[in-house]
Image (cartoon, helix red, strand yellow):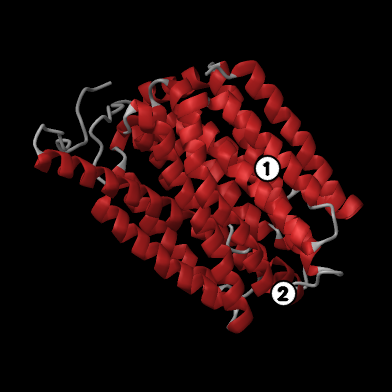
């Protein structure tokens, strides 16, 4: 391991007013860049969810088959994340983030050229290959560069960007599919992704605390170390469960609401994801809660909120279902803020590879979350999906209370 730094000198606080202003300005720039990074990533990831009922009709395919447009990029994220974590530990943080953001925008735009469902799934898989270079490295950047007392709130700013981006992608896709067609949605989102890349390039400072891993042997040794760490293993399992439940619920809720008695179209389904915006308010609060009461207590509260929200969606009233989805999404983002922040704490060092493994398991959970609930949907409809998700919440509570320490 080398002591070399992939960085420019940090902005230092001084006793003068100019120094304080520079420090505050630098902090605002970092938070803006991290927010935009999360936004530009997640505007892409789940963009097809409100389009699934339409794809079912356009491509004459089953719910399970069209759901592969959701699971394909998520699976690609899971496969690529460990390698990206090792790469970032060797190359640095900012350059990997920028290259990945640029790469993500290209298959996004090209997805608009898909002639059939198979081609669309391939483009979606290629999108997913670039996403770990943003997510895992941003998590490591935050753990390394943030003041210790502000890691939770800084991570919450990034997660808030992912919340708003996740909503925007679905909302834009629903509007475009209703007023134009689904191809226009991919072009619009690809252009937004390019703009986000340029913003991050301009505002995100280089790392000042990054320590380069100079050999593949050291990087592989760090992976072995992480896999022997019970606190990290519990965090990986929690991450798996969190995204499993989020993707499962927000994928199959579209079929539930598109069918009778609700009969919602793509624009209305895209609007339903407005519930994500509550996460933009709750997630920063969750970050402050993390810093105040700790990871485990915050996670327990969040899981309780998810359980209450999912139970409410069983009531056949659209306003009550929206309330339930609002509670569920609020709990999910609070869980994600807690788990992703705990990765850096539990790893201690080689945080990019630790974050890469977390992202791999997290998105592997998301990939399974768009497929396995499909079998429960076929047997028990939305009730079957909810029953599965509630069981998974019990696993999260067990793991956090046994293996997490505040």
Q: Is residue 50 above or below residue 27?
A: below
Give the image quarter of residue 388: top right
Can you see residue 155?
Answer: yes
The residue that label 2 is drawn on is: 265
At x 31%, y 40%, the residue is 93
> Looking at this view, is 238 or 222 the one in front?
238
> Looking at this view, is 44 or 297 the one in front?
297
Report the number of discs.
2
At x 53%, y 69%, the residue is 111
In the rendered image, residue 102, in percent from the top left (x then y), is placed at 36, 58
Q: Neighbour class for label 2 at 10 Å: few (<14), some, many (≥20)?
A: many
- Tell me the number on the disc at residue 244: 1
Q: Is residue 385 above or below residue 109?
A: above
Q: Is residue 353 above or below residue 108?
A: above
Extreme residue toward the right, this view: 379
In the rendered image, residue 286, in percent from the top left (x then y), is placed at 52, 38
Q: Of helix, strand and loop, which one carries label 1? A: helix
At x 54%, y 32%, the residue is 339
């Amino acid at each position: 391991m080398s002591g070399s730094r992939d960085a420019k000198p940090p902005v230092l606080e001084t006793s003068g007013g100019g120094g304080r202003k520079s420090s505050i300005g630098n902090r605002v720039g970092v938070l803006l860049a991290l927010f935009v990074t999360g936004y530009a990533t997640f505007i892409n990831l789940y963009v097809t969810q409100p389009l699934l009922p339409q794809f079912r009709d356009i491509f004459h395919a089953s719910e399970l088959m069209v759901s592969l447009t959701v699971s394909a990029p998520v699976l690609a994220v899971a496969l690529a994340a460990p390698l990206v974590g090792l790469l970032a530990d060797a190359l640095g943080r900012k350059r990997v983030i920028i290259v990945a953001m640029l790469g993500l925008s290209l298959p996004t735009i090209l997805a608009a050229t898909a002639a059939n469902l198979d081609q669309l799934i391939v483009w979606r898989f290629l999108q997913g290959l670039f996403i770990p270079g943003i997510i895992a490295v941003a998590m490591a950047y935050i753990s390394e560069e943030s003041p210790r007392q502000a890691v939770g709130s800084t991570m919450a700013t990034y997660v808030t960007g992912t919340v708003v981006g996740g909503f925007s992608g679905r909302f834009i896709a629903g509007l475009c599919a209703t007023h134009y067609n689904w191809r226009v949605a991919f072009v619009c989102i690809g252009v937004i992704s390019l703009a986000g890349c340029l913003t991050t390039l301009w505002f995100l400072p280089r790392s000042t605390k990054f320590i380069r891993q100079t050999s593949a042997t050291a990087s592989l040794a760090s992976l072995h170390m992480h896999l022997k760490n019970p606190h990290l293993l519990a965090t990986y399992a929690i991450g798996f469960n969190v995204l499993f439940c989020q993707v499962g619920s927000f994928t199959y809720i579209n079929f539930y609401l598109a069918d009778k008695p609700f009969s919602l179209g793509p624009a209305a389904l895209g609007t339903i994801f407005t519930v994500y915006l509550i996460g933009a308010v709750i997630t920063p609060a969750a970050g402050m809660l993390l810093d105040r009461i700790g990871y485990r207590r915050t996670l327990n509260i969040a899981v309780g909120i998810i359980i209450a929200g999912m139970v409410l969606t069983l009531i056949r009233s659209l306003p009550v279902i929206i309330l339930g989805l609002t509670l569920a999404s609020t709990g999910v983002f609070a869980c994600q803020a807690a788990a992703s922040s705990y990765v850096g704490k539990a790893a201690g060092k080689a945080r990019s590879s630790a974050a890469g493994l977390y992202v791999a398991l997290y998105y592997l959970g998301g990939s399974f979350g768009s497929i396995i609930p499909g079998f429960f949907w076929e047997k028990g409809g939305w009730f079957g999906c909810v029953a599965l998700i509630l069981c998974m919440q019990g696993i999260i509570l067990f793991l956090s209370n046994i293996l997490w320490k505040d």
